[in-house]
Image (spheres, rainbow, N blue to C red):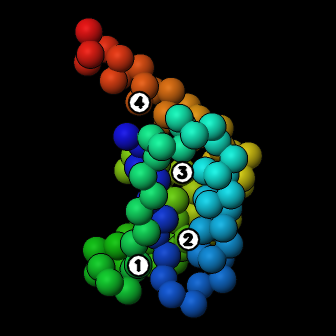
């Protein structure tokens, strides 16, 4: 499973735009790929550690815990990164099954 995490806060315009881009990109992926992506949203207002790390960079997008983007999110770059993450996840699952 690939985990995409969006870190933001309520009433953040760029966070809303990033969420829309994420929803759009995932919806455009083939069903088999989209089903392997878990989307998690976290707010810096609810987590002091997230606030300390990211308050000046939201929205922040992590893919499997690794920084993908902050401030502005590119749909094309996100699509490429998610497709690669899903391919890697599928290969790892195949190897475990052997």
Disc 4 and disc 2: Cα gap in Å?
25 Å
Residue found 43% across the figure and 69% down from its top: 41
Q: Give the structural element (helix, strand or loop) at label 1.
A: strand
Q: Quadrant of the C terminus?
A: top left
Q: Give the structural element (helix, strand or loop) at label 2.
A: loop
* Label at residue 68: 3
Residue corresponding to mark 4: 89
Q: Give the structural element (helix, strand or loop) at label 3.
A: strand
- Residue 11 location, x and y as percent? 57, 90
Residue corresponding to mark 2: 59
Disc 1 and disc 4: Cα gap in Å?
26 Å
- Say which label, 3 or 1, has the lower sequence index: 1
Residue found 30% across the figure and 79% down from its top: 47
Disc 3 and disc 1: Cα gap in Å?
17 Å
Residue corresponding to mark 1: 43
Question: Would you call the spot at circle 3 few (<14 residues within 10 Å), some (14-19), or many (20 or more)?
Answer: some
Q: Determine whether label 2 and label 3 are within 8 Å by CB.
A: no
């Amino acid at each position: 499973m690939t985990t995409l995490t969006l870190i933001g806060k309520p009433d953040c315009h760029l966070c809303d735009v990033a969420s829309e881009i994420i929803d759009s990109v995932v919806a455009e992926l083939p069903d088999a790929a989209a089903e392997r992506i878990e989307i998690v949203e976290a707010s810096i207002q609810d987590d002091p550690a997230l606030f300390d790390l990211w308050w000046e960079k939201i929205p922040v997008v992590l893919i499997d815990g690794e920084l993908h983007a902050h401030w502005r999110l590119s749909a094309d770059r996100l699509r490429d990164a998610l497709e690669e993450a899903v391919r890697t996840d599928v290969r790892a699952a195949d190897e475990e099954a052997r």
